[in-house]
């Protein structure tokens, strides 16, 4: 298993690594420059109680797009698989270092809140990736999130897992009124036949019944999403007329901006 230490690039900060446990490390960040008030930092996470639903892909899409637009982004990877770590590392190895993107690996529940507190006001976005299991890590991640994305690959198993994730999140919200993140279902790895699947076709109604939102943007099944892990670095960095890449780039933009507009809509309501 590959597990990265801590990587950071393009941020006005430096990292000191402190070993936690036997093999894992967490980075302690010290910043040279404040970027704004604590509330300017937005926090998004992708959660599911099942493996392979598209969480890490969702986080990579958001990270790559926001960083390409000059936003300062930090990914916090809480999944021991370290797939976001691997992506950041591979991009560097391929000479496609992703500017403006910082990376941290955390494996202790109690590190989430203090790490996020340290980053607040110093980066534009914090993106949290979690393991595909009903782990205790979901609670601290949900607590700090402004927006929680529930990616769903269109299978019955995944749908059951999505409902389970939703129930966990809803219980967390009921138990603690201070947690009121926006929860969004996003459909990942879509193929043409999936458009007729009732949960895809009627996703806005389905989500409404659960009192959550559904993303309009569909993340289609495309080879660049798997290739970017080993070949490309991040998709927005690629200059290509390849149809699949052009479409993946458009998806990066549309999905990211849809998530941001949901965030600002909700915050406008609160204000
Ligand atoms: N839209 C897509 N098109 C093609 N392949 C995809 C797409 N989304 C995800 N994949 C591939 O499917 C696999 C699972 O996706 P991903 O790693 O994002 O899921 P995950 O929910 O993070 O899984 P885990 O729970 O194991 O962390 C990966 O190999 C990924 O590259
Ligand atoms: Mg993952």
Image (spheres, rainbow, N blue to C red):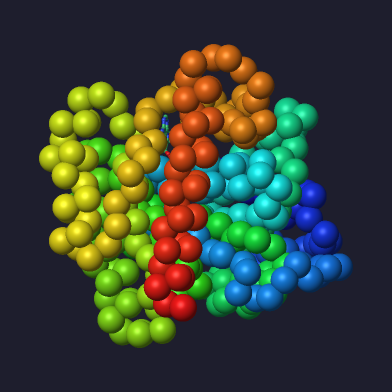
185 or 30, which is in the foreground?
185
Residue 6 x %, y %: 72, 55
Name the residue: 59% across, 42% down: 65
Q: Is residue 45 left or right of residue 187?
A: right
Kindly tell me whether residue 135 is visible in this rendering: no
Residue 61 x %, y %: 52, 42
Residue 174 x %, y %: 28, 81
Residue 171: quarter of image: bottom left
Residue 179: quarter of image: bottom left
Residue 226 x %, y %: 49, 29
Q: Is residue 165 above or below residue 240?
A: below
Q: Is residue 129 above or below residue 69?
A: below
30 or 66, which is in the foreground?
66
Q: Is residue 112 above or below residue 245?
A: below
6 or 207, which is in the foreground?
207
Name the residue: 46% across, 78% down: 271
254 or 145, which is in the foreground?
254
């Amino acid at each position: 298993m590959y597990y990265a230490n801590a990587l950071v690039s393009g941020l006005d900060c430096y990292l000191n690594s402190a070993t936690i446990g036997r093999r894992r490390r967490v980075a302690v960040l010290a910043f040279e420059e404040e970027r704004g008030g604590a509330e300017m930092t937005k926090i998004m996470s992708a959660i599911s109680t099942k493996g392979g639903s598209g969480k890490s892909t969702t986080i990579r899409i958001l990270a790559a797009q926001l960083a390409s637009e000059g936003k300062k982004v930090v990914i916090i990877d809480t999944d021991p698989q370290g797939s976001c770590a691997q992506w950041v590392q591979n991009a560097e190895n391929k000479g496609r270092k992703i500017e403006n993107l910082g990376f941290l690996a955390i494996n202790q529940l109690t590190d989430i809140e203090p790490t996020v507190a340290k980053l607040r006001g110093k980066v534009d976005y914090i993106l949290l990736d979690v393991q595909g299991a009903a782990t205790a890590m979901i609670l601290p991640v949900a607590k700090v999130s402004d927006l929680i994305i529930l990616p769903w690959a269109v299978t019955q198993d995944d749908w059951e897992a999505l409902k389970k994730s939703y129930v966990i999140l809803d219980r967390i919200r009921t138990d603690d009124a201070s947690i009121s993140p926006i929860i969004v279902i996003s459909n990942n790895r879509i193929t043409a036949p999936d458009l007729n699947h009732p949960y895809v076709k009627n996703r806005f109604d389905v989500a409404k019944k659960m009192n959550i939102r559904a993303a309009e943007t569909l993340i289609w099944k495309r080879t660049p999403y798997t290739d970017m892990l080993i070949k490309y670095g991040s998709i927005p960095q690629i200059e290509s007329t390849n149809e699949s890449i052009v479409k993946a780039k458009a998806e990066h933009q549309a999905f990211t901006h849809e998530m941001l507009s949901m965030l600002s809509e909700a915050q406008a309501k609160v204000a």
